[in-house]
Amino acid sequence: MASGNGAGAPANPVKDVTTASFKADVIAASARQPVLVDFWAPWCGPCKQLGPVLEKAVADAKGKVALVKMNIDDHPQIPGQLGIQSIPAVIAFDKGQPIDGFMGALPESQVRGFIERLVGPLSAAADELLAQAEAATAKGDAAGAASLYARVLTEDETNPKAIAGLAKLHVEVVEIPEVLNSNSRNIHRNEFRTSNYQLRRGGQVWCAASGCTGGKERSPIPQTLRAGSEF
């Protein structure tokens, strides 16, 4: 087990994955939940910046997603198969396949957004939405409050605070806005687009890395990674 790739990392250790353990720690483990693989190296300054941010966001996911790290100097085979040419690079695996990813030391908001696209609102994000909904209710903005509660319930339909908030709205107003009956799943999910980096599964584009970095050009990953790739 490793303590992370940068100072100030959370106390919970993050597992170091090796070429030999990749099938068990990533491919097999991703059958239970998404697994993020953080490809890094000891000499990489941006990797040390990203590490604590990534670990904090994963901790806020409360077990919905796992994080492992791979030192590309010690284990170059897997990143070579994935076509990774620059680090830090984070690839998400689900059901044994790479489905999403990004490169570069992204700011915390973008890292959290990346994880939320995989597993829904993180605990801190849900708490913030609930606080905003309560503030909207206090201001008499029933429509805004209902929309915020709906966003929370879209990903966590048993959230007790959101349910209680909607019940309170139902009592206080004549009609709950139609937004509650709509599919709000896409309200907070921005499509992850690309300009030069795509992971593909069966020919379908699944992810884009460079599009989330403000257009800064990066070394592209070859568009040849498909379902059934052997690791």
Image (cartoon, grey):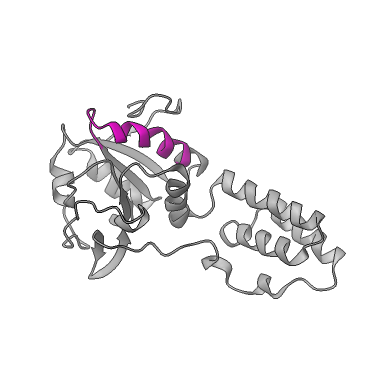
Q: Which residue does the image show at 23% across and 38% down from the upper left?
A: 21
Q: Which residue does the image show at 43% across and 25% down from the upper left?
A: 8
Count the marks: 0
Answer left or right for 111 relative to 167. left
Residue 112 sits above or below residue 220 on the image: above
Q: Which residue does the image show at 38% across and 61% down from the upper left?
A: 192
Of 193 and 31, nearer the camera is 193
Residue 160 at least partly seen: no
Q: Which residue does the image show at 34% across and 50% down from the upper left?
A: 30
* Quarter location, residue 178: bottom right
Relative image position of residue 41 (x, y in whole percent): 23, 32
Of 110 and 26, nearer the camera is 110
Residue 87 sits above or below residue 16 on the image: below
Our reading of the magenta stretch's main secondary structure is helix
- Is 99 magenta? The answer is no
- Highlighted range, magenta: 40-57
Q: Quadrant of the N terminus?
A: top left
Of 209 and 39, nearer the camera is 209
* Quarter location, residue 66: top left
Answer left or right for 226 relative to 158. left
Relative image position of residue 6 (x, y in whole percent): 35, 27
Residue 79 at least partly seen: yes
Relative image position of residue 104 (x, y in whole percent): 31, 44
- Is 43 magenta? The answer is yes
